[in-house]
Amino acid sequence: MNVLIIYAHPEPTSLNGSLKDFAIRRLEANGHTVQVSDLYAMQWKAQVDAADTLERQAGTPFRPSLDSQRAFANGWQSSDIAAEQDKLRWADAVIFQFPLWWFSMPAIMKGWVDRVYAYGFAYGVGEHSDARWGNRYGEGSLAGKRAMLVVTTGGWESHYSARGINGPIGDVLFPIQHGILYYPGFDVLPPFVAYRTGKMDDARAAVVRDALGQRLDALFETAPIPFRPQNSGQYEIPALTLRDDIAPERSGFAAHMA
Amino acid sequence: MNVLIIYAHPEPTSLNGSLKDFAIRRLEANGHTVQVSDLYAMQWKAQVDAADTLERQAGTPFRPSLDSQRAFANGWQSSDIAAEQDKLRWADAVIFQFPLWWFSMPAIMKGWVDRVYAYGFAYGVGEHSDARWGNRYGEGSLAGKRAMLVVTTGGWESHYSARGINGPIGDVLFPIQHGILYYPGFDVLPPFVAYRTGKMDDARAAVVRDALGQRLDALFETAPIPFRPQNSGQYEIPALTLRDDIAPERSGFAAHMA
Protein backbone atom coordinates (compact mmCIF):
# COMPACT_ATOMS: atom_id res chain seq x y z
CA MET A 1 0.00 0.00 0.00
CA ASN A 2 1.02 3.65 -0.30
CA VAL A 3 1.90 5.47 2.90
CA LEU A 4 2.57 9.20 3.18
CA ILE A 5 4.34 10.61 6.24
CA ILE A 6 3.84 14.31 6.94
CA TYR A 7 6.66 15.10 9.33
CA ALA A 8 7.59 18.26 11.24
CA HIS A 9 10.71 18.47 13.39
CA PRO A 10 13.62 20.85 12.80
CA GLU A 11 16.40 18.45 13.87
CA PRO A 12 17.17 15.20 11.99
CA THR A 13 19.09 13.74 14.98
CA SER A 14 16.12 14.20 17.34
CA LEU A 15 13.96 11.42 18.76
CA ASN A 16 11.35 12.47 16.21
CA GLY A 17 13.88 12.16 13.42
CA SER A 18 14.88 8.67 14.51
CA LEU A 19 11.25 7.57 14.84
CA LYS A 20 10.51 8.89 11.35
CA ASP A 21 13.50 6.99 9.87
CA PHE A 22 12.45 3.88 11.77
CA ALA A 23 8.89 4.18 10.45
CA ILE A 24 10.07 4.44 6.84
CA ARG A 25 12.22 1.29 7.21
CA ARG A 26 9.48 -0.64 8.97
CA LEU A 27 6.79 0.27 6.46
CA GLU A 28 9.05 -0.57 3.52
CA ALA A 29 10.03 -3.88 5.15
CA ASN A 30 6.30 -4.60 5.31
CA GLY A 31 6.05 -4.11 1.55
CA HIS A 32 4.56 -0.63 1.51
CA THR A 33 5.71 2.27 -0.65
CA VAL A 34 6.54 5.35 1.41
CA GLN A 35 6.71 9.05 0.61
CA VAL A 36 7.72 11.64 3.20
CA SER A 37 6.87 15.32 3.30
CA ASP A 38 9.63 16.53 5.63
CA LEU A 39 8.27 20.02 6.12
CA TYR A 40 11.41 21.57 7.61
CA ALA A 41 13.63 20.02 4.94
CA MET A 42 11.21 21.30 2.28
CA GLN A 43 11.23 24.77 3.89
CA TRP A 44 7.47 24.60 3.77
CA LYS A 45 5.81 28.04 3.64
CA ALA A 46 3.50 28.21 6.64
CA GLN A 47 1.34 31.27 6.05
CA VAL A 48 -1.73 31.41 3.85
CA ASP A 49 -1.50 34.48 1.62
CA ALA A 50 -2.26 35.86 -1.83
CA ALA A 51 0.87 34.22 -3.30
CA ASP A 52 -0.87 30.85 -2.93
CA THR A 53 -3.02 31.75 -5.95
CA LEU A 54 -0.99 32.05 -9.16
CA GLU A 55 -3.50 34.03 -11.24
CA ARG A 56 -4.87 36.89 -9.22
CA GLN A 57 -6.33 40.16 -10.38
CA ALA A 58 -3.94 42.79 -9.04
CA GLY A 59 -5.41 45.13 -6.46
CA THR A 60 -8.36 42.93 -5.49
CA PRO A 61 -8.71 42.01 -1.81
CA PHE A 62 -7.40 38.59 -0.83
CA ARG A 63 -10.20 36.37 0.46
CA PRO A 64 -8.66 33.16 1.83
CA SER A 65 -11.65 30.89 1.13
CA LEU A 66 -12.77 32.37 -2.19
CA ASP A 67 -9.24 32.61 -3.52
CA SER A 68 -8.58 29.02 -2.49
CA GLN A 69 -11.78 27.90 -4.25
CA ARG A 70 -10.90 29.70 -7.48
CA ALA A 71 -7.30 28.54 -7.45
CA PHE A 72 -8.28 24.91 -6.82
CA ALA A 73 -11.02 24.90 -9.46
CA ASN A 74 -8.90 26.56 -12.16
CA GLY A 75 -5.49 25.00 -11.64
CA TRP A 76 -4.08 28.25 -10.25
CA GLN A 77 -2.74 26.81 -7.02
CA SER A 78 0.88 27.32 -6.03
CA SER A 79 2.79 24.19 -7.13
CA ASP A 80 3.80 23.20 -3.58
CA ILE A 81 0.12 23.00 -2.60
CA ALA A 82 -0.88 20.99 -5.68
CA ALA A 83 2.03 18.56 -5.11
CA GLU A 84 0.88 17.81 -1.56
CA GLN A 85 -2.69 17.24 -2.74
CA ASP A 86 -1.35 14.76 -5.32
CA LYS A 87 0.50 12.91 -2.56
CA LEU A 88 -2.72 12.72 -0.56
CA ARG A 89 -4.59 11.31 -3.58
CA TRP A 90 -1.81 8.73 -4.01
CA ALA A 91 -1.76 7.63 -0.36
CA ASP A 92 -3.76 4.80 1.19
CA ALA A 93 -2.67 5.92 4.64
CA VAL A 94 -1.22 9.16 5.98
CA ILE A 95 0.84 9.50 9.14
CA PHE A 96 1.20 12.93 10.71
CA GLN A 97 4.26 12.95 12.96
CA PHE A 98 5.18 15.89 15.19
CA PRO A 99 6.15 16.97 18.69
CA LEU A 100 3.16 18.37 20.59
CA TRP A 101 4.03 22.05 21.03
CA TRP A 102 1.59 24.06 23.13
CA PHE A 103 -1.04 21.34 22.85
CA SER A 104 -1.11 21.37 19.06
CA MET A 105 1.08 20.79 16.02
CA PRO A 106 4.11 22.96 15.22
CA ALA A 107 3.26 26.05 13.17
CA ILE A 108 4.91 24.66 10.04
CA MET A 109 2.53 21.68 10.05
CA LYS A 110 -0.50 23.86 10.80
CA GLY A 111 0.57 25.82 7.74
CA TRP A 112 0.55 22.61 5.71
CA VAL A 113 -3.07 22.06 6.77
CA ASP A 114 -4.11 25.68 6.23
CA ARG A 115 -2.67 25.74 2.69
CA VAL A 116 -3.11 22.17 1.36
CA TYR A 117 -6.70 21.85 2.61
CA ALA A 118 -8.15 23.92 -0.21
CA TYR A 119 -11.79 24.89 -0.68
CA GLY A 120 -13.21 22.24 -3.03
CA PHE A 121 -10.61 19.72 -1.89
CA ALA A 122 -10.88 19.40 1.90
CA TYR A 123 -13.94 21.58 2.54
CA GLY A 124 -16.77 23.08 0.54
CA VAL A 125 -17.25 19.67 -1.11
CA GLY A 126 -20.68 18.24 -1.98
CA GLU A 127 -24.25 19.46 -1.78
CA HIS A 128 -25.95 21.28 1.09
CA SER A 129 -29.59 20.28 1.45
CA ASP A 130 -32.12 19.23 4.07
CA ALA A 131 -30.44 15.82 4.24
CA ARG A 132 -26.77 16.62 3.73
CA TRP A 133 -24.42 19.34 4.85
CA GLY A 134 -21.60 18.86 2.40
CA ASN A 135 -19.31 15.86 2.17
CA ARG A 136 -17.54 16.11 5.48
CA TYR A 137 -17.09 14.35 8.81
CA GLY A 138 -16.83 10.85 7.44
CA GLU A 139 -17.23 11.70 3.75
CA GLY A 140 -15.13 13.80 1.40
CA SER A 141 -12.13 13.76 -0.90
CA LEU A 142 -10.06 11.64 1.47
CA ALA A 143 -12.69 9.01 2.30
CA GLY A 144 -11.40 5.46 2.20
CA LYS A 145 -7.94 6.51 3.38
CA ARG A 146 -6.55 6.02 6.87
CA ALA A 147 -4.77 8.61 9.01
CA MET A 148 -2.82 8.30 12.25
CA LEU A 149 -1.04 10.78 14.48
CA VAL A 150 2.43 9.96 15.84
CA VAL A 151 3.05 12.47 18.61
CA THR A 152 5.74 13.09 21.21
CA THR A 153 5.14 15.08 24.40
CA GLY A 154 7.39 16.40 27.14
CA GLY A 155 4.59 15.89 29.68
CA TRP A 156 3.86 12.66 31.50
CA GLU A 157 1.10 10.24 30.56
CA SER A 158 -0.77 10.99 33.80
CA HIS A 159 -0.83 14.70 32.91
CA TYR A 160 -2.90 13.70 29.87
CA SER A 161 -5.17 11.21 31.67
CA ALA A 162 -8.93 11.55 32.26
CA ARG A 163 -8.37 13.97 35.17
CA GLY A 164 -4.85 15.10 34.25
CA ILE A 165 -4.20 18.82 34.20
CA ASN A 166 -3.45 19.06 30.45
CA GLY A 167 -6.74 17.38 29.59
CA PRO A 168 -7.16 13.83 28.27
CA ILE A 169 -4.94 13.24 25.25
CA GLY A 170 -7.94 12.20 23.13
CA ASP A 171 -9.63 15.53 23.87
CA VAL A 172 -6.45 17.57 23.34
CA LEU A 173 -6.12 15.89 19.92
CA PHE A 174 -9.84 16.04 19.04
CA PRO A 175 -9.57 19.30 17.07
CA ILE A 176 -6.91 17.58 14.94
CA GLN A 177 -8.29 14.04 14.75
CA HIS A 178 -11.95 15.00 14.28
CA GLY A 179 -11.60 18.54 12.93
CA ILE A 180 -8.66 18.08 10.54
CA LEU A 181 -8.60 14.34 9.74
CA TYR A 182 -12.17 13.03 10.00
CA TYR A 183 -13.57 16.20 8.42
CA PRO A 184 -12.30 15.55 4.85
CA GLY A 185 -13.09 11.84 5.17
CA PHE A 186 -10.12 10.02 6.71
CA ASP A 187 -10.69 6.96 8.89
CA VAL A 188 -8.72 8.06 11.96
CA LEU A 189 -6.77 5.46 13.91
CA PRO A 190 -6.05 5.86 17.62
CA PRO A 191 -2.97 8.06 18.01
CA PHE A 192 0.48 6.78 18.87
CA VAL A 193 1.80 8.98 21.68
CA ALA A 194 5.27 8.86 23.28
CA TYR A 195 5.28 10.75 26.60
CA ARG A 196 8.02 12.37 28.69
CA THR A 197 10.46 12.59 25.83
CA GLY A 198 12.67 15.15 27.56
CA LYS A 199 14.11 12.30 29.64
CA MET A 200 14.40 9.49 27.12
CA ASP A 201 17.28 7.06 27.53
CA ASP A 202 18.19 4.42 24.97
CA ALA A 203 16.27 1.66 26.74
CA ARG A 204 13.03 3.62 26.81
CA ALA A 205 13.56 4.83 23.23
CA ALA A 206 13.78 1.17 22.17
CA VAL A 207 10.48 0.43 23.93
CA VAL A 208 8.84 3.37 22.16
CA ARG A 209 10.24 2.25 18.80
CA ASP A 210 8.98 -1.30 19.29
CA ALA A 211 5.53 -0.06 20.23
CA LEU A 212 5.44 2.18 17.16
CA GLY A 213 6.56 -0.75 15.02
CA GLN A 214 3.58 -2.78 16.18
CA ARG A 215 1.21 0.05 15.37
CA LEU A 216 2.75 0.37 11.89
CA ASP A 217 2.45 -3.39 11.33
CA ALA A 218 -1.28 -3.10 12.08
CA LEU A 219 -1.79 0.13 10.12
CA PHE A 220 -4.34 -1.39 7.74
CA GLU A 221 -6.09 -3.61 10.30
CA THR A 222 -6.52 -1.34 13.33
CA ALA A 223 -10.10 -0.25 13.97
CA PRO A 224 -10.60 3.50 13.49
CA ILE A 225 -11.97 5.81 16.17
CA PRO A 226 -15.78 5.46 15.84
CA PHE A 227 -16.59 9.10 15.10
CA ARG A 228 -20.19 9.60 13.99
CA PRO A 229 -20.71 10.39 10.29
CA GLN A 230 -22.43 13.74 9.81
CA ASN A 231 -24.87 12.73 7.07
CA SER A 232 -25.95 9.44 8.62
CA GLY A 233 -29.16 10.77 10.14
CA GLN A 234 -27.62 11.15 13.60
CA TYR A 235 -27.40 14.95 13.36
CA GLU A 236 -30.08 17.58 12.85
CA ILE A 237 -29.53 19.57 9.66
CA PRO A 238 -28.65 22.46 9.44
CA ALA A 239 -28.15 22.87 13.21
CA LEU A 240 -25.69 19.95 13.17
CA THR A 241 -26.47 19.06 16.75
CA LEU A 242 -26.66 15.41 17.72
CA ARG A 243 -30.27 14.19 17.70
CA ASP A 244 -31.93 14.30 21.13
CA ASP A 245 -32.49 10.53 21.21
CA ILE A 246 -28.86 9.65 20.52
CA ALA A 247 -26.60 9.38 23.58
CA PRO A 248 -28.87 11.87 25.39
CA GLU A 249 -26.66 11.84 28.49
CA ARG A 250 -23.57 12.96 26.59
CA SER A 251 -22.23 16.34 25.54
CA GLY A 252 -18.87 17.66 24.40
CA PHE A 253 -16.36 15.77 22.27
CA ALA A 254 -17.39 12.39 23.71
CA ALA A 255 -20.86 12.73 22.17
CA HIS A 256 -19.37 12.40 18.69
CA MET A 257 -18.01 8.90 19.24
CA ALA A 258 -20.37 5.95 18.86
CA MET B 1 -3.92 50.52 30.88
CA ASN B 2 -1.70 48.93 28.23
CA VAL B 3 -3.37 46.62 25.73
CA LEU B 4 -1.54 44.46 23.22
CA ILE B 5 -3.40 42.99 20.23
CA ILE B 6 -1.82 39.97 18.56
CA TYR B 7 -3.57 39.84 15.21
CA ALA B 8 -3.43 37.36 12.34
CA HIS B 9 -5.34 37.89 9.12
CA PRO B 10 -3.80 38.32 5.67
CA GLU B 11 -6.29 40.89 4.35
CA PRO B 12 -6.68 44.38 5.89
CA THR B 13 -10.12 44.89 4.28
CA SER B 14 -11.52 41.69 5.84
CA LEU B 15 -14.06 41.51 8.66
CA ASN B 16 -11.13 40.66 10.93
CA GLY B 17 -9.26 43.74 9.76
CA SER B 18 -12.24 45.98 10.43
CA LEU B 19 -12.80 44.46 13.88
CA LYS B 20 -9.13 44.98 14.72
CA ASP B 21 -9.28 48.64 13.64
CA PHE B 22 -12.51 49.07 15.60
CA ALA B 23 -10.91 47.54 18.70
CA ILE B 24 -7.95 49.90 18.56
CA ARG B 25 -10.24 52.94 18.31
CA ARG B 26 -12.53 51.74 21.09
CA LEU B 27 -9.70 50.91 23.48
CA GLU B 28 -8.00 54.24 22.83
CA ALA B 29 -11.30 56.06 23.31
CA ASN B 30 -11.49 54.34 26.69
CA GLY B 31 -8.11 55.83 27.63
CA HIS B 32 -5.95 52.76 27.07
CA THR B 33 -2.65 52.65 25.21
CA VAL B 34 -2.65 50.08 22.41
CA GLN B 35 0.09 48.23 20.59
CA VAL B 36 -0.65 45.82 17.74
CA SER B 37 1.45 42.91 16.53
CA ASP B 38 -0.03 42.52 13.04
CA LEU B 39 1.69 39.24 12.23
CA TYR B 40 1.05 39.28 8.47
CA ALA B 41 2.15 42.91 8.16
CA MET B 42 5.29 42.07 10.19
CA GLN B 43 5.93 39.03 7.95
CA TRP B 44 6.30 37.07 11.17
CA LYS B 45 8.50 33.98 10.78
CA ALA B 46 6.38 31.02 11.78
CA GLN B 47 8.80 28.12 12.12
CA VAL B 48 10.97 27.41 15.16
CA ASP B 49 14.52 26.72 13.98
CA ALA B 50 18.20 27.17 14.79
CA ALA B 51 18.17 30.75 13.46
CA ASP B 52 16.11 31.73 16.52
CA THR B 53 19.30 31.50 18.61
CA LEU B 54 21.88 34.09 17.64
CA GLU B 55 24.94 32.46 19.22
CA ARG B 56 25.05 28.81 18.33
CA GLN B 57 28.01 26.48 18.17
CA ALA B 58 28.20 25.45 14.52
CA GLY B 59 27.57 21.80 13.84
CA THR B 60 25.78 21.03 17.11
CA PRO B 61 22.30 19.54 16.90
CA PHE B 62 19.42 21.99 17.32
CA ARG B 63 17.37 21.15 20.42
CA PRO B 64 14.27 23.39 20.44
CA SER B 65 13.83 23.49 24.23
CA LEU B 66 17.49 23.61 25.28
CA ASP B 67 18.37 26.14 22.60
CA SER B 68 15.43 28.29 23.64
CA GLN B 69 16.54 28.10 27.29
CA ARG B 70 20.12 29.11 26.50
CA ALA B 71 19.09 31.88 24.15
CA PHE B 72 16.59 33.34 26.64
CA ALA B 73 19.02 33.15 29.59
CA ASN B 74 21.96 34.66 27.71
CA GLY B 75 20.32 37.34 25.58
CA TRP B 76 20.91 35.35 22.40
CA GLN B 77 17.32 35.38 21.18
CA SER B 78 16.45 36.59 17.72
CA SER B 79 15.39 40.25 18.06
CA ASP B 80 11.85 39.65 16.80
CA ILE B 81 11.28 37.18 19.64
CA ALA B 82 12.73 39.47 22.31
CA ALA B 83 10.61 42.39 21.03
CA GLU B 84 7.40 40.41 21.42
CA GLN B 85 8.36 39.34 24.95
CA ASP B 86 8.94 43.02 25.79
CA LYS B 87 5.46 43.85 24.50
CA LEU B 88 4.01 41.11 26.71
CA ARG B 89 5.85 42.51 29.76
CA TRP B 90 4.47 45.96 28.92
CA ALA B 91 0.87 44.82 28.50
CA ASP B 92 -1.81 44.72 31.17
CA ALA B 93 -4.10 42.82 28.79
CA VAL B 94 -3.48 40.90 25.58
CA ILE B 95 -6.07 40.23 22.88
CA PHE B 96 -5.44 37.40 20.42
CA GLN B 97 -7.54 37.99 17.31
CA PHE B 98 -7.78 35.47 14.49
CA PRO B 99 -10.12 33.54 12.20
CA LEU B 100 -10.59 29.96 13.43
CA TRP B 101 -8.94 27.88 10.71
CA TRP B 102 -9.28 24.13 11.12
CA PHE B 103 -10.34 24.52 14.73
CA SER B 104 -7.23 26.40 15.80
CA MET B 105 -5.28 29.58 15.10
CA PRO B 106 -3.68 30.32 11.71
CA ALA B 107 -0.16 28.89 11.37
CA ILE B 108 1.44 32.34 11.55
CA MET B 109 -0.02 32.89 15.03
CA LYS B 110 0.88 29.39 16.20
CA GLY B 111 4.40 30.31 15.13
CA TRP B 112 4.23 33.40 17.31
CA VAL B 113 3.39 31.16 20.29
CA ASP B 114 5.99 28.51 19.41
CA ARG B 115 8.78 31.12 19.14
CA VAL B 116 7.88 33.84 21.67
CA TYR B 117 7.01 31.35 24.43
CA ALA B 118 10.64 30.64 25.32
CA TYR B 119 11.89 28.19 27.91
CA GLY B 120 12.45 30.29 31.04
CA PHE B 121 9.84 32.81 29.90
CA ALA B 122 6.59 30.90 29.31
CA TYR B 123 7.60 27.44 30.52
CA GLY B 124 10.35 25.88 32.58
CA VAL B 125 9.81 28.66 35.16
CA GLY B 126 10.03 28.08 38.93
CA GLU B 127 10.90 25.15 41.16
CA HIS B 128 9.74 21.55 40.86
CA SER B 129 9.22 19.92 44.25
CA ASP B 130 6.73 17.79 46.18
CA ALA B 131 4.52 20.85 46.52
CA ARG B 132 5.02 22.70 43.24
CA TRP B 133 5.42 21.74 39.60
CA GLY B 134 6.89 24.90 38.19
CA ASN B 135 5.15 28.25 37.95
CA ARG B 136 2.43 27.39 35.48
CA TYR B 137 -1.33 27.08 35.15
CA GLY B 138 -2.23 30.17 37.10
CA GLU B 139 1.29 31.29 37.96
CA GLY B 140 4.22 32.34 35.78
CA SER B 141 5.78 35.25 33.94
CA LEU B 142 2.44 36.58 32.71
CA ALA B 143 0.52 36.35 35.99
CA GLY B 144 -1.55 39.41 36.79
CA LYS B 145 -2.25 40.10 33.12
CA ARG B 146 -5.49 39.41 31.30
CA ALA B 147 -5.94 37.67 27.97
CA MET B 148 -8.93 37.31 25.68
CA LEU B 149 -9.52 35.59 22.36
CA VAL B 150 -11.42 37.38 19.60
CA VAL B 151 -12.33 34.70 17.08
CA THR B 152 -14.34 34.50 13.87
CA THR B 153 -15.75 31.25 12.49
CA GLY B 154 -17.44 30.25 9.26
CA GLY B 155 -19.53 27.68 11.15
CA TRP B 156 -22.80 28.43 12.91
CA GLU B 157 -23.14 28.89 16.66
CA SER B 158 -25.19 25.68 16.94
CA HIS B 159 -22.35 23.73 15.31
CA TYR B 160 -20.24 24.75 18.33
CA SER B 161 -22.91 24.12 20.99
CA ALA B 162 -22.85 21.45 23.72
CA ARG B 163 -23.90 18.73 21.26
CA GLY B 164 -22.84 20.49 18.05
CA ILE B 165 -20.74 18.50 15.61
CA ASN B 166 -17.62 20.69 15.87
CA GLY B 167 -17.54 20.34 19.65
CA PRO B 168 -18.46 23.05 22.17
CA ILE B 169 -16.55 26.25 21.45
CA GLY B 170 -15.11 26.29 24.98
CA ASP B 171 -13.67 22.82 24.46
CA VAL B 172 -12.37 23.59 20.97
CA LEU B 173 -10.58 26.61 22.45
CA PHE B 174 -9.42 24.85 25.66
CA PRO B 175 -5.97 23.93 24.28
CA ILE B 176 -5.47 27.64 23.56
CA GLN B 177 -7.21 29.22 26.54
CA HIS B 178 -5.93 26.77 29.16
CA GLY B 179 -2.82 25.39 27.44
CA ILE B 180 -1.42 28.58 25.89
CA LEU B 181 -2.91 31.42 27.97
CA TYR B 182 -3.54 30.11 31.49
CA TYR B 183 -0.29 28.08 31.43
CA PRO B 184 2.12 31.06 31.67
CA GLY B 185 -0.17 32.84 34.11
CA PHE B 186 -2.75 34.89 32.23
CA ASP B 187 -6.22 35.40 33.67
CA VAL B 188 -8.28 34.24 30.70
CA LEU B 189 -11.54 36.03 29.92
CA PRO B 190 -14.42 34.27 28.15
CA PRO B 191 -13.78 34.43 24.40
CA PHE B 192 -15.53 36.76 22.01
CA VAL B 193 -16.70 34.66 19.08
CA ALA B 194 -18.39 35.88 15.88
CA TYR B 195 -20.03 32.98 14.02
CA ARG B 196 -21.05 32.44 10.40
CA THR B 197 -18.84 35.15 9.06
CA GLY B 198 -19.00 33.87 5.48
CA LYS B 199 -22.45 35.47 5.22
CA MET B 200 -22.02 38.71 7.08
CA ASP B 201 -24.01 41.71 5.87
CA ASP B 202 -23.52 45.24 7.16
CA ALA B 203 -26.34 45.00 9.67
CA ARG B 204 -24.99 41.86 11.30
CA ALA B 205 -21.42 43.21 11.19
CA ALA B 206 -22.66 46.23 13.15
CA VAL B 207 -24.22 43.95 15.77
CA VAL B 208 -20.95 42.03 16.07
CA ARG B 209 -18.97 45.26 16.39
CA ASP B 210 -21.27 46.57 19.11
CA ALA B 211 -21.00 43.33 21.06
CA LEU B 212 -17.22 43.41 20.77
CA GLY B 213 -17.24 47.03 21.93
CA GLN B 214 -19.08 46.05 25.10
CA ARG B 215 -16.57 43.29 25.80
CA LEU B 216 -13.70 45.74 25.30
CA ASP B 217 -15.34 48.28 27.61
CA ALA B 218 -15.43 45.59 30.32
CA LEU B 219 -11.95 44.24 29.60
CA PHE B 220 -10.63 44.98 33.09
CA GLU B 221 -13.82 44.10 34.97
CA THR B 222 -14.96 40.83 33.36
CA ALA B 223 -14.53 37.77 35.57
CA PRO B 224 -11.95 35.32 34.16
CA ILE B 225 -12.72 31.67 33.39
CA PRO B 226 -12.28 29.90 36.76
CA PHE B 227 -9.52 27.48 35.76
CA ARG B 228 -7.99 25.67 38.75
CA PRO B 229 -4.46 26.78 39.74
CA GLN B 230 -2.00 23.89 39.56
CA ASN B 231 -0.10 24.55 42.80
CA SER B 232 -3.14 25.26 44.94
CA GLY B 233 -3.32 21.80 46.49
CA GLN B 234 -6.09 20.66 44.13
CA TYR B 235 -3.76 18.46 42.05
CA GLU B 236 -1.58 15.50 43.03
CA ILE B 237 2.10 16.19 42.39
CA PRO B 238 3.86 14.94 40.27
CA ALA B 239 0.96 13.01 38.65
CA LEU B 240 -0.91 16.32 38.14
CA THR B 241 -4.26 14.61 38.28
CA LEU B 242 -7.12 16.37 40.06
CA ARG B 243 -7.45 15.09 43.65
CA ASP B 244 -10.03 12.31 44.04
CA ASP B 245 -12.18 14.36 46.41
CA ILE B 246 -12.47 17.36 44.08
CA ALA B 247 -15.34 17.25 41.58
CA PRO B 248 -15.18 13.43 41.67
CA GLU B 249 -17.94 13.13 39.05
CA ARG B 250 -16.04 15.14 36.45
CA SER B 251 -13.38 14.28 33.91
CA GLY B 252 -12.02 15.91 30.77
CA PHE B 253 -11.62 19.65 30.26
CA ALA B 254 -14.60 20.49 32.47
CA ALA B 255 -12.82 19.09 35.54
CA HIS B 256 -10.31 21.94 35.40
CA MET B 257 -12.88 24.67 35.93
CA ALA B 258 -14.02 25.42 39.48
Image (cartoon, coloured by chain):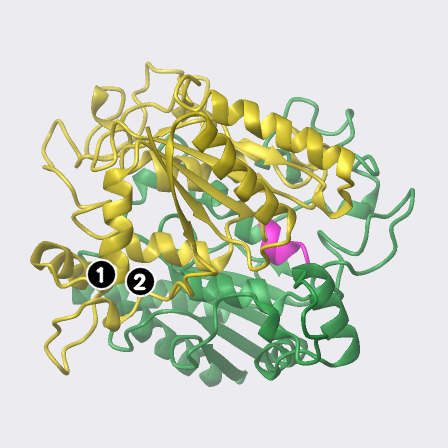
Chain colours: A green, B yellow
Tags 2 and 1 touching, CB below 8 Å: yes
Identify the element where label 1 is drawn.
helix
Q: Residues within 10 Å of mark 2 (few under 14, many from 20)?
A: some
| Residue A83 falls left or right of residue B25 | right
Q: Nearer the viewer, residue A28 or A113?
A: A113
The secondary structure that dominates the magenta segment is helix
Instruction: Tell me the chain of label 2.
Output: A
Quadrant of the image for the C terminus of chain B? top left
Q: Nearer the viewer, residue A69 or A215?
A: A69
Q: Does the stretch in magenta take in A235?
A: no
Q: Residues within 10 Å of mark 1 (few under 14, many from 20)?
A: few
| Above-or-below relation of A146 to B173 | below
Q: Is residue B141 visible?
A: yes
Q: Amino acid at mark 1?
A: Arg
Q: Is residue B252 visible?
A: no
Image coordinates of residue B79 in percent, x first then y, are 23, 62
Q: Are marks 2 and 1 on the same chain?
A: yes
Q: CA distance from mark 2 to mark 1?
A: 6 Å
Query: Residue at position x 20%, y 56% from top?
Result: A198
Residue interval drawn in magenta: A178-185
Looking at the rendered structure, which numbered label has been put on residue A208? 2
Q: Amino acid at mark 2?
A: Val
Residue placed under numbered mark 1 in the picture: A204
Identify the element where label 2 is drawn.
helix
Instruction: Tell me the chain of label 1.
Output: A
The quadrant holding residue B219 is: top left
